């Protein structure tokens, strides 16, 4: 298993960060990495997600929501063709640090026999996409 992990400190309450993160309709207006999400953020629901890592074409997949804890965690599991080939567990976490300040954690755990073939591209382009999204989320939440 391989993991990408990014985090950023946001000077905003968890509720505000959460409201931006879960407002899928507005993603095309601000999100440089996740271009769109369709569906409901409820456990076991299927989403339709389009992402565009740096220096790549957009990719659309249909992950299933695996975690939903209001104002704390939201995650999905996406799979390429079948389980075990290339699975990505995409996780967003909001950790309050002090009143009105939170740590936003954005990570993904990759597993499957195709992961080593794509790891270098993920480690660079996808991680850059995570960072760009984190920075835009911070900008919006701190307004």
Image (tube, rainbow, N blue to C red):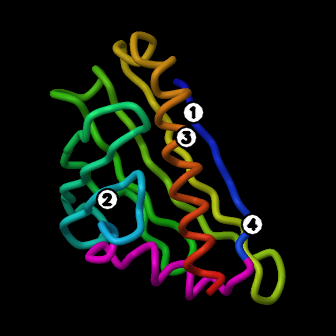
Label 1 crowding class (10 Å Cα cut-off): few <14, some 14-19, many 20+? some
Q: Which residues are magenta?
A: 11-26
Q: Which mark is residue 3?
A: 1
Report the magenta stretch's main SS: helix
Q: Are marks 3 and 1 in contact (CB under 8 Å)?
A: no
Q: Which mark is residue 65?
A: 2
Dot 4 or dot 1, earlier in sequence? 1
Q: Position of residue 18 (x, y in %)?
A: 51, 79
Mark 4 against mark 1, which lies toward the viewer?
4
Secondary structure category for the residue under label 1: strand
Q: Which residue is mark 3?
A: 128
Dot 2 or dot 4, earlier in sequence? 4
The residue under the point 57% across, 87% down is: 15
Left or right position of 69 against 8: left
The relative height of residue 61 versus residue 105 in the rendered view (above or below) is above
Left or right position of 115 against 140: left
Cα gap from disc 1 to disc 2, whole angstroms = 18 Å
The relative height of residue 124 versus residue 10 in the rendered view (above or below) is above
Dot 3 or dot 1, earlier in sequence? 1
Q: Position of residue 75 (x, y in %)?
A: 42, 57
Cα gap from disc 2 to disc 3, whole angstroms = 23 Å
Mark 2 against mark 4, which lies toward the viewer?
4
Secondary structure category for the residue under label 4: strand
Q: Position of residue 110 (x, y in %)?
A: 45, 30
Give the quadrant of the C terminus: bottom right
């Amino acid at each position: 298993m391989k993991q990408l992990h990014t985090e950023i400190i946001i000077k905003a309450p968890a509720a505000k960060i959460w409201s931006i993160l879960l407002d899928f309709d507005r993603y095309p207006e601000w999100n440089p990495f996740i271009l769109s999400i369709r569906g409901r953020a409820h456990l076991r629901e299927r989403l339709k997600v389009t992402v565009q890592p740096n220096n790549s074409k957009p990719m659309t997949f249909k992950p299933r929501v695996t975690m939903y804890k209001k104002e704390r965690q939201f995650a999905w599991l996406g799979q390429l063709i079948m389980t075990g080939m290339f699975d990505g567990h995409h996780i967003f976490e909001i950790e309050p640090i002090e009143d009105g300040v939170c740590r936003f954690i954005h990570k993904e755990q990759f597993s499957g026999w195709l992961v080593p073939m794509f790891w270098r591209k993920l480690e660079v382009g996808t991680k850059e996409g995570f960072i760009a999204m984190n920075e835009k989320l911070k900008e919006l939440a701190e307004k």
